Image (cartoon, coloured by chain):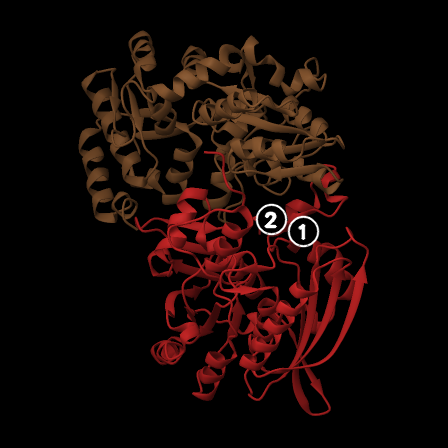
Amino acid sequence: MADLKDFRLECPLPLNDNERVQLAHGGGGRRMHELLENLLLPSFGNDMLLERHDGATLNIAGAKLAFTTDSYVVRPLFFPGGDIGTLAINGTVNDLAMCGARPLYLSSAFILEEGMPMETLRRVVESMRVSARAAKVQLVTGDTKVVDKGKGDEIFINTAGIGVVAHGLTISPRSVRSGDAILLSGDVGRHGIAIMATREGLSFESAIESDCAPLWEPVAALLAAGVEIHCLRDLTRGGLSSGLIEIAETAGLRMAIEESLVPVREEVMGACEILGLEPLYLANEGRFLAFVPQRDVERGLEILRRFDVSRGAACIGEVRVHPAGLVTMKSRLGTERILDMLSGEQLPRIC
Amino acid sequence: MKYVDEYRDAAAAQEYAAAIVRTVTRPWTIMEICGGQTHTIVKYGIDELLPKAVTLVHGPGCPVCVTPVELIDKAWQIAARPDVIFCSFGDMLRVPGTTGDLFSVKARGGDVRIVYSPVDAVEIAKQNPAKQVVFFAVGFETTAPANAMSVYRAKQIGLKNYSVLVSHVLVPPAMEAILNSPTNQVQGFLAAGHVCTVMGYVEYYPIAAKYRVPIVVTGFEPLDLLHGIYMCVSQLEQGRAEVENQYARSVRREGNTTAQDLMAKVFCVVDRKWRGLGGIPQSGLGLTAQYAEFDAEARFGLSAYTAEEDAECISGLIMQGVRKPEECSAYGTRCTPDHPLGAPMVSSEGACAAYYRYRRLRTHAPVVAGGSSRG
């Protein structure tokens, strides 16, 4: 099969611009995947890592545990709907939830820049305290380092988390089956626009707030009701499109969605029109996909809609076989196109 | 969303498509000028709604795509200087020059910033008097007024540390270059709505008359394009070659005269090199003598620098509508958005990027045309 990766291997061009790390290598798009494929997976490859899930599921002395880590380097530190502290807790809690694990314990490591106002740190720590309590997790270990002024950007946070898996399902991209329904827990794109608007000083008629929130509760409710979850994926960098593409590629199946079924708030749509961005590629921090058999669709949606964080849940499409590894979207005009992974982050266009 | 959804209505689109089917009796080739229109066409599959007799070819109206590689190199060299803050629209940062793209300068420590308006770059210059602030002034007539405003304002307030790297190009000379080409296949144009919002459409009358081509000023939403195509094929079928305005909700005959006056103060018409198309006489804008002090090329001693484009990239043929992206031997193989040979593969308005992003199906190997497609 004419797989693009095959072509890339025989690409004769000197990859000069890949000889230094660029922002796109952390942008959640194709460049970041290249880094994973070419450097990290070959170096550390093992069965758990190769699952390419949001966290690893480990069997330790008879207990099934989920383990994950994430680093937070967001600018601005504070934005409508959250801050770096809420992200540092919820991001890791959500990665555990996406393994179907009840989040229990987190570690937290701070890298602080010399001269950073102590008040900023206090605010971030208070956010983390409140978020941890809301997500019912405890911070049980941590570390603090300070780097010279100018060698950091005020504050970087890393959190790692452990959760317990108390069900018999294998929640993983490889469990996705043809015919599965694709459930989306709510409207997409708000976090990306909230960050961009604050960072660039753009103001819109109504403030767009990040959707940053913990996702374990709705996942727990789905599991408790016996919904047969095949896979979960929280939609962060790279947005809905990248989440779907990653699963399509890992599962070797086609994700077929419909544009008109994907919820996007009017103000997010408006901001995207102005900036030339696509909401399906914008970052989220409180949205996830659930892949379930068709028989569980109605019940799954009804359960998700009980929670504030997933009140706007919708079924946006289904999994098919061909063409394998692709995401296709039916447009409002009834025509069909593919959704491709971006190189790095979306760039606002010229005109 | 109001003012957007009504231009993406499926039933109305089907009606326009049916009207086009009823109108067309023989094959016609129409070019949409603007890359924004190309993306709407490919993204929404507009061409799939059309009868086979209507062929859409994609024009040169992607400002990123037509910026010659030597200008990208100049930007790279300026941005690499430690005394410079280099400001650009985001689109330009991923375009490859011979030494790399602007992101690679940034990775090497260059101060490269994305701005949303050139006026923001003037602000940055005011706030950083010890630095040279350079704005990458690219684009068609659409971006020229704002770029002119930044230079005008810089002169007004006496800024000595602001300059612009100018690569402005104009639509009408490019249309004439396409029509004069011996390989031309274009029988009708959809003119770029936003360019006409600034310039109006009076300047298209002589082109329509001289070359006997219909020119329909067209918007960017799916229904705009279908309506524009309908108006264009109607003219072709009736043997008319007139200038018509589909995008009347934005475009007036005379355009935005305030913007034109400002452009005329700051810019004058000059010869320009186009990526893929070569030099076209009187096809771009440069700074007038009165504003020459803001010319970044002169300020940084780069006026004489030249560079050759990648020989394998057939962007010139694609932007003249002679080839489709899938007919390029490098498309999807040696040229992808991650490793582009030319700008049309990275720009958000580039034809190759549109095909790659929306149309590529992995079950279909990229179409590999014969050696003849090499530019």
Q: Position of residue A54 (x, y in %)?
A: 61, 70
Question: Which one is nearer the viewer's eye here, B55 or A74?
Answer: A74
Please name the residue shown 53% across and 22% down the image.
B316
**Chain letter matching colour brown:** B
Please identify the quarter of the rendering in which residue A314 is found: bottom left
In what quadrant of the picture does the C terminus of chain B appear?
Answer: top right
Q: Is residue A77 left or right of residue A60?
A: left
Of residues B221 and B16, the one nearer the viewer is: B221
Give the SS element for disc 1: helix
Q: Which chain is red?
A: A
Q: Say whether marks 2 and 1 touch (CB < 8 Å).
A: yes
Q: Position of residue A82 (x, y in %)?
A: 53, 65
Q: Amino acid at mark 2?
A: Gly
**x then y, percent, for residue B143:** 46, 27
**Which residue is the site of mark 1?**
A25
Instruction: Give the SS element for disc 2.
Output: loop
* Tag 1: amino acid: His
- State which tag comes first along the sequence, 2 or 1: 1
Disc 1: host chain: A
The residue beneath circle 2 is A344
Q: CA distance from mark 2 to mark 1?
A: 7 Å
Q: Residues within 10 Å of mark 1 (few under 14, many from 20)?
A: many
Q: Mark 2, residues whose alpha carbon is within 10 Å: few (<14), some, or many (≥20)?
A: many
Residue B51 appears in the picture as rendered: no
Where residue A225 sits in the image (x, y, percent)?
Answer: 43, 87
